[in-house]
Image: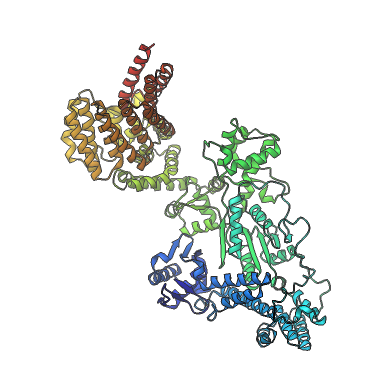
Amino acid sequence: MRFEILGPTSVLDEDGAPVALGGPRVRALLTLLALNAGRVVGAGQLVDDLYGPHPPDGVANALQSQVSRLRRALGRDLVEFHPAGYRLVADPHDVDARRFELLALDGRRALAAGDAGRAAALLCEALELWRGAPLADAPHAVSAAAGLEELRLAAVEDRLQADLALGRHRDLVAELRRLTAAHPLRERLRAQLMRALYGSGRQAEALAVYEEARRLLDRELGIEPGAELAAAHLAVLRADPSLTPQTTAPSPAPIQPPLPSSLPAPGGPAGSPRGGFKQGLRAQLTSFVGRAEELAQVGARLRDSRLVTLIGPGGAGKTRLAQEAAAQEPGDVCFVPLAHVAGAAGVPGAVLVALDIRDALLPAPQRAAVGPVTRLLTALAERDLLLVLDNCEHLVAAVAELADALLASCPGLRVLTTSREALGITGESILPVSPLRLPPPEPDDPLEYAAVRLFADRAAAVRPGFAVDAGNAADVVRICRALDGLPLAIELAAARLRTLSVADVAARLDDRFRLLTRGSRTALPRHQTLRAVVAWSWDLLDDAEQRLAARLSVFVGGATPEAAERVCGLPEEVLFSLAEKSLVEYVGGRYRMLDTIRAFCAERLAESGETAAIRDAHTAYYLDLVLTADPLLRTADQLTWLARLDQESDDLEAAVRWTTVSGQPETGLRLLAHSACYWWMRGHRGVIAGLAAALLARIGDARPAGMEEEYVMCLLVTAWTGVADDVVRERLAEVRELLPITHLPERVEFLMMMRSMFTGPPGDVEQIYHELQAHTEGLPPWQRALSYSGAGFVLQILGRVEESLTSFRCALAAFRAIGERWGTVLVLSGLGELASREGDYAASYALSDEALTLARELDARAEMAEALCRRGDALLGMGEPLGGRADYEEAAELARRVGSMDMLAWAHLGMAEVALIGGERDAALSLLAQARAECPDDWYSTEDIRNRIDEALGRAVSER
């Protein structure tokens, strides 16, 4: 589709036929989205430009209604919703306004290169795209329309300049008379009219044009003619040959008059980084680390957009990135620091000072005072310049207003701003500046990560000879991760190496605000300590934003808008505002705080006295979540709910910890019991066992009445570590006393699996089999499938192979019928073991391979390790020890990551058996000793592994 907004808004389909759009509001909405095609336009900005200063009640619903109508007209896929607003999915080149800008830019470049013929053709093509007033259907988008009008007028001036260079002086006089009458203060048009008149043999009229312009400027603005008009006047007086028409060849390049004394000459002083004059850019004292990709992105954005804003949290390195990007610009640059500007009125003056534009020493008393914005508009109207406005967050509205005015009137101007929130004006290109890339907890090469390289570089500056090596890498990684990869925080931490070791710095990061207090003495006060960095952002928030930021600190892993609103008690619009101000970041559908910001906000929450109440609300939210999610983990929807709980895992753990600390055992038991299935499937063993043990210690001997199932599940979870001590043995014995093996769970369904796995059947296996059979058919679907599986294992113990096979097949069909992958893996494992015992290793291999595929789909690493071990056993039986060893080694690594001690023992047992086959008896003995130490003694499910270890030890000893 093609979108036309340089006149009444219209859309043409692929065949060139017009598309029906509907009423004026829909047309206005399309106009605004097309103006920013391919970019997200904020809902607030759309409301302002759609409805003006008096939006209707329920404006959010009104906007959504117009979006729905536009989607019906264009197709849903062309108008996308984003958390920050809406986006028209279209190539900007399909919008006439964008094509106009590109053609005008190409024409201007051709003109500068001396190719007047090509310039005239390109500029004529650009101007032919105009069909009337720009953005005619969006009457409230005044600034954007004014900007386009200014670009059109600049393109007209460039086309006139090209025509003058081609010797068309006589043809242009009438047009220039009309234009100067319409735009009497436009000095370039006056200069072009003088050239046209002189080239037509009318020198006296040309001089009269100058004199008229001089008087007008003095009367209206109290200023003298600018550089270009003064140069044209001098050229006419001198009868400069460059003013003579050239009809057979292109004329020389347009006159480039000297700049006024208040503006620096192009080229700048010796040593300018990239040719143009760089005002306000300091030479850097430190290296620029880890931002090559972002630096390229800034350069690309500045080529495509006239207004680029770098946003991000305090200390992310926005200022340094802007300085480095400005230094690479080939043209003139002016860097304007705004950190010390106290109020909105001071912004234009700060820019004037940075540009070295001074007031007249002796102003005439009869002249009216000229405002700073008018002076800026006059000084920059014809200048190509990159203006960098740094640290705008406390002056956002004032900077937005000034940038909008300058960009609308100065076509050669580009603006780069740094701020903790965007300016929010039409045409702004927003580039988030994230913290530096962080290493994982145990990286192969820490120096591959920018955060570590920055720490190493700054540490070497204060401690000569410092390098990241095997002895300190773990502490350096810990420091960088704890500080979120924030460059300023990392630099402050590195500076502490003057007096502390790396290990000491890492150990003291729990009190980071007290530790990181010695920044550069010449830095801004808010950049000298970590606390000051965050406090500056905090002070810019309103009361509602501060309340939400403090309350949001209870979330460990971030929050969805729905969770934040429920727990924190404030509307989601406040959360979106925090995101716009870089207090939280939007990642993967969640709003997260950097740990440093979160620690600061947690202090503010404690000061407010709300910590307990907000943590209780947080815990209640997560209890409701697990009560909803737990049964769905054992259905066809389990992948969706596993993924959901993956996002909430850290907060689930935090909620359980809070119930222990705050003395809420019943809530803690419910949380833990209904999270156990998720944690088991995900292989979160050691940490969760510790949570359960801490909760039981808090409960003591006072078991909550009516919560036997939840209590027993908590007892079982403590055994997940695989450590067999007297406490664990007592707890497993207590499980057998509290709930008989025939107990059918009513609330905690997964208990049916855990109970049998850790305590096994009673002595009379035959009896338990008949009891299972008696209850199976009346059970819910998942419990029935598990009961078939349990019967298969019991029949296997009894040696009734065919009946066992039948039960396993019933279980497999039942689990597949409900779409439950984890249970399917469990049954495939049982079938694989049965095949292996019968000597059918090929079948065992195939079943284990199928189980491995499903386990990988679930990302269930403990089950992946089990399937690899069983497949390794099958490969040994098939006479392929090398293949078996590869499976055991992969299984050992997976088991180690999730703390699955039974699978780790099995993997080391398999590796020992491979060593025995290869005649490596000493290696086998070492591996078997390791496996025996790892294998849990009191789990019923590990009895077979223990027996195999003992048998292999006997063989190894007998081979001495």
Q: Residue furthest right?
A: 362
Q: Quadrant of residue 499?
A: top right
Q: Is there any visible trace of residue 720 in the rendered image?
A: yes
Q: Is there any visible trace of residue 571 in the rendered image?
A: no
Quadrant holding the C terminus: top left
Residue closest to the eye, 228 or 260: 228
Residue closest to the eye, 313 or 870: 870
Residue closest to the eye, 32 or 689: 32
User: Is 566 placed left or right of 528 in the picture?
Assistant: left
Decide: is 290 above or below 87: above
Q: Give the percent coordinates (x, y) of residue 641.
A: 35, 47
* Colour mode of the rendering: rainbow
Q: Quadrant of residue 68?
A: bottom left
Decide: is 956 above or below 312: above
Count of labels shown? 0
User: Is 227 placed left or right of 81 in the picture?
Assistant: right
Q: Give the percent coordinates (x, y) of residue 139.
A: 52, 77
